[in-house]
Amino acid sequence: MTEVETTPGVVDMKVTAKKSINFYMNSAKAFFTGIVDKEGKTRDPVCVLNISGLGEAINIASQAAGSVVKEGLATIHKIETSYPDLMTNGTERGCARICITLHKSS
C-alpha cells in the first residue's frame, strides 16, 4: 500500500494484488477512524480517501471501499474507470484501472 497525502485530510491509497483483501479493508477503515501507530503517535481521521487499483487489484479496491461504506464510515462520492496504456517488457498495453473517492460520513 502506498499512501500519499498532498492536501490535508485527503489520502490516496494505491492497492496491489500482492497483499490480502483484509489488509486493505482494515487500512481503509483505519484511515476514517484514526489510529495510534507503533511509536504511539496518533493519526487523525481523514476526510477524503482515494482508493485506486490496476488490473487484478480492481476487485480488492472495490471490496475495501465497500467495507468502509457498509460500516457507515464513509460514502462513495465518485467512481472513475479508465484503460491507461502501460509499458510492459518494451511493449505498450492497456490495463484496466479504477479510482474510488470516499468522503467521511458526518
Image: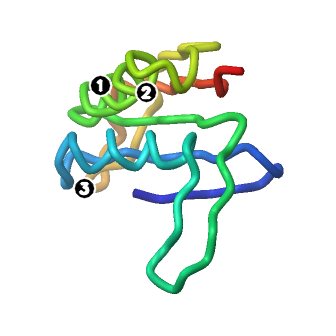
The residue singled out by tag 2 in the image is 68
Task: Identify the mark nearer the N-term, 3 or 2.
Answer: 2
Quadrant in which the C terminus is drawn: top right
Q: Residues under labels 3 and 2: Cα distance?
A: 36 Å
Question: Is residue 24 visible to us here?
Answer: yes
Amino acid type, residue under disc 3 in the picture: Asn
Q: Position of residue 53 (x, y in %)?
A: 39, 36
The 10 Å Cα crowd at callout 2, few under 14, some 14 to 19, many 20 or more, is many
Secondary structure at numbered mark 2? helix
Q: Are marks 3 and 1 in contact (CB under 8 Å)?
A: no
Q: Name above or below for residue 30 compared with residue 35.
A: above
Number of the label disc, if any, that sits on residue 63: 1
Residue at image coords 55%, 81%: 40
Residue furthest out toward the right? 8
Q: Quadrant of residue 28?
A: top left
Task: Identify the mark nearer the N-term, 1 or 2.
Answer: 1
Residue at image coords 51%, 27%: 99
